[in-house]
Amino acid sequence: MDQNAIGIIVLIAVSILIYLGLAHRALDRMKLSDRGALLVIGLIILGGFINIPLPFLPFNTAVNVGGALIPVGLAIYLLVRAGTRKEWLRALVGTVATAVVVYVVGSLINSGSTMEPAGRAAVIDAIYLYPLVGGIVAYLFGRSRRGAFIAATLGVLLVDIFQYAWLINQGAPASYTMLIGGAGAFDAIVLAGIFAVILAELIGESLERLSGGPKTEGRPPELVKGLKKPAPDSHAGIGGGAENRRGSNKKEDEI
């Protein structure tokens, strides 16, 4: 099956979970509404068929809208709305750490042509390796749902930038073609972000349950209230909803 088709199926499955309300808590912590998340997924799927060429570069380079621009735009939106400076800093540190680890692991494990910084053993395809490694590293550094998504998405994008610099250093011919986010809906940038959020949700939720709920000591009452289960009609953020939904989360440093 075509990789882009698999990616669309994955995103449709995520859309169904959102529609059924099963992703409500994760979206609430990420300051996204159900409608906003579904809109982003739709844009990723449609944008996966659109490539924007970047002129005046040493070799053919283009950016895929769905595989790169949309998820990166969402990551920047979440970074701007980060609850605290600590969360903002963790997300940026996680971005750099994710990029470095993914690039190094990819270079050691994957095989490729002479124009690829890889070589020893083709154990797993990069389209699966990058999201797996990127998601894990991004969660370890980002910790919160937002931080993990930001670190995974921007970190894997940085890997493409590292790759671009490597190709220039290797003297890639003008006929060489590089497509950032080229797998569209199934690109590593998209999958890494989804996997990082899943890890943050599963591990974060488990830790919360083991500790008896979110930490409340020293936190304002309105923030503590915002950490409880959100009301069914409380969604806002990207895509609309109740205007006051996020008022109590402005200083949140998520688990």
Image: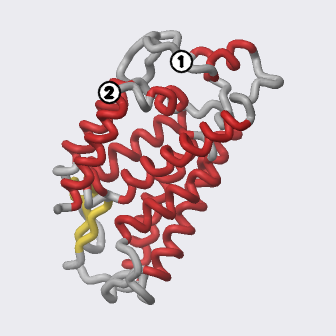
- Which image quarter: residue 21? top left
Task: Give coordinates of residue 166: x percent, y percent.
Answer: 43, 78
Task: Give coordinates of residue 220: x percent, y percent.
Answer: 76, 17
Q: Which residue is mark 2?
A: 19
Q: CA distance from mark 1 to mark 2?
A: 16 Å
Using a 10 Å C-alpha cutoff, classify the residue at mark 2 as few (fewer than 14 neighbours), some (14 to 19) or many (20 or more): some
Please state which of residues 190 and 14 is positioned toward the viewer in this rendering: 14
Quadrant assignment for the N terminus: bottom left
Residue at 50% in and 36% down? 78
Q: Amino acid at mark 1?
A: Pro
Please state which of residues 185 and 154 is positioned toward the viewer in this rendering: 185
Q: Which mark is residue 88?
A: none
- Which image quarter: residue 252? top right
Q: Which residue is mark 1?
A: 230
In the picture as drawn, the residue positioned furthest to the right comes out as 218
* Horizontal relation, residue 14 to residue 25: left or right: left
Instruction: Look at the picture and state if 223 lies above or below 244.
Output: below
Quadrant assignment for the C terminus: top right
Number of numbered tags placed on the structure image: 2
Task: Give coordinates of residue 179: x percent, y percent.
Answer: 27, 64
Residue at 61% in and 22% down? 249
Task: Give coordinates of residue 126: x percent, y percent.
Answer: 37, 70
